[in-house]
Image: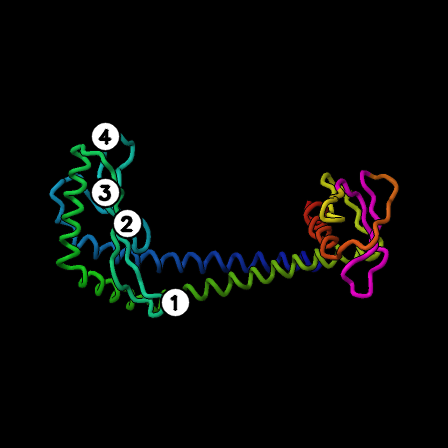
Amino acid sequence: MTKAQILDQIIEKKQVELATLTETFNEVEKKRDSMYFEIIQEYFGGEFTLDDVYFHHDYSTSFVVKRPHKEYNYDKEMITLRFRDDWKTGEFTNIETSMYSTNDNSQWELERLFTAGEVAKVLLDHGDDIVAKFNSYKDSFADKYRAARDAKWSVEADVQKLKDEKNQTYLTKAETLLNGEGLVFDKEKKGSIDLRWDWTLRGITSAKILSKTASGKSADIEISTYGETPRVFEKVRTSNIDTLLWQYRDYVINA
């Protein structure tokens, strides 16, 4: 079993663990966010004059007042509330409102302005209380939320490290071949390299480094294109040659 195969097995086990942790985190977040929505409904539930106006929980701390519109096949936004927090303390500090502007003076649009006024009245009367209640609920979930989030992040980081390690095994294999017997692009896609800033060589079927300069910044490389007789290109930048390693990984190893 190759190192890459062993890493695949470890990654698979980690991803199963990650799926469980993600589900746990999502449940905690959903419960916390549903409590936010309960606050919104508590303060705005009975405030609208129009019967078909309602609050939609867009995501986390974003809430949209919506209403059906005969010219649309979906309920249209009237005004949106978003809770902003202090990036240093994490506490909610204010409620931002947003509305689109229009020159339409139809009854629906005028009623939208009227409804926005009703929202504004609640914010003027109870805005500070709403923010305080949001912070209270956020604090009550802080430890559970942080623990679930950090556990998920930790395993996500582990999976990424394993994927990076697996990727490096492919690049190391390609580098060993390039400096030894040579890379062979024997699958559908062929390699390409910028020999100079204005010269790109395509259709590479094989490549092999013959020698490097003392600094290692450039090298002489033998290349075949479309299976033709190999040619030697002198003093090609190593950084340009390295692109062949990634191409070999994608076009041959992972093809």
Q: Residues within 10 Å of mark 2 (few under 14, many from 20)?
A: some
Q: Give the mark, 4 or 1, whose residue is nearer the N terminus.
A: 4
227, above or below 83, in the image: above
Q: Which residue is mark 3?
A: 78
Q: Give the mark, 2 or 4, whose residue is nearer the N terminus.
A: 2
Using the rendered image of the protein, determine whether residue 1 is visible from the camera's viewpoint: no
Mark 3 belongs to which amino acid? Answer: Met
Helix, strand or loop at label 1? It is: helix
Tell me the mark number nearer the camera, choosing from 2 and 4. 4
Q: Quadrant of residue 54?
A: top left
Mark 2 belongs to which amino acid? Answer: His
Q: Which residues are magenta?
A: 202-226
Q: Give the mark, 2 or 1, whose residue is nearer the N terminus.
A: 2
Label 3 to label 1: alpha-carbon separation: 34 Å
Q: Which residue is mark 2?
A: 57
Q: Residues within 10 Å of mark 1 (few under 14, many from 20)?
A: few
Tell me the mark number nearer the camera, choosing from 3 and 4. 3
Q: Quadrant of residue 139?
A: bottom left
